[in-house]
Image: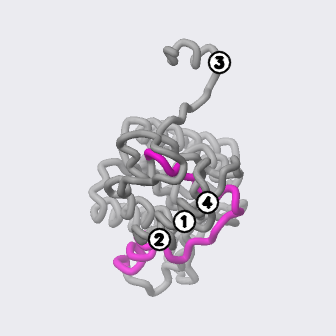
Amino acid sequence: MIYWFTGQPGSGKTTLALALKKRLGIRFHIDGDDLRLLSSNKNYSREGRMDNIRLAQNLAHFLQNKGEDVIVSLVAPYKELREDFKNLTDVTEIYLHTTEIRGREHYFAEDYEAPSDNFIEIDTTDIPISDCLDLIDSGQNLVPTDVKKRTIAIDFDGVIHRYSEGFKGKDNAYDPPNENITEALEYFKSRGYRLVVFSTRPKEVIADWLKNYDLADYFEDITDIKIPAKIYIDDRGYKFESWKKTLEELEL
């Protein structure tokens, strides 16, 4: 996960980023001011800001691909760049603002664009740091995006249903759920995602099975068609990048 704090200077980005880093035990925090020092970027024009944003995104994505959670605190005034990054990878965007005068107003980005969907909004005026962190942990104040971006489609057999002995008939869902599924579903729901089961099994078989294991309330639908979704979770899935790479990696 990448936690991206955005907002005008003085809104509390660095303070909350450091507090969240400590609470979650995350090793890496990318701060906009530190990044400018490291890259010797003193250009605060649109071009200079975009260079700093892209550098932060590239570093965060690199660390994420190494299996690390990352916290970023950066004004990042341009919504399009932030939205593109959210569509690329798993990002929790946290938009901070305040009505309190904190002495950083002369550094404000005049062209700052507030987020419009799929973000956590926190007014940091007169609110304790611990309460802000609780809002982030719980996913409260999450402003949802459209259904496609909020939907996670999850395969039934092998992902939800343990399916340890393979197919035994379309009406025979014989195994219990996979381990830690409740924790995973709780996490997705806390982040505002809409969960859908996809499977070629009869809908009523899956519905009865979910109800039997107290999982029915997590899912909004069961389908056998490919629906618009942010991501598909499938035990037999393959992430396509190019046919050349596919033929090199798959040994069929």
Q: Residue at x 56, y 32 (%)?
A: 239
Q: Relative to 240, does residue 112 appear above or below in the rendering?
A: below
Amino acid residing under circle 1: Ala
Cβ atoms at labels 1 and 2 below 8 Å apart = yes
Cβ atoms at labels 3 and 1 below 8 Å apart = no
Residue 142 lies in quadrant: bottom right
Amino acid residing under circle 3: Trp
Which residue position is annotated with label 2? 211
**Relative to 10, 111 lies left or right:** right
Q: How many numbered callouts?
A: 4
Q: Residue at x 46, y 57 (%)?
A: 3
C-alpha distance separating marks 2 and 3: 41 Å
Tell me the element at label 2. helix
Q: Nearer the viewer, mark 2 or mark 3?
A: 2
Badge 4 or badge 2: first in the primary sequence? 4
Amino acid residing under circle 2: Lys
Badge 2 or badge 3: first in the primary sequence? 2
From which residue to which does the magenta span run?
Answer: 129-158
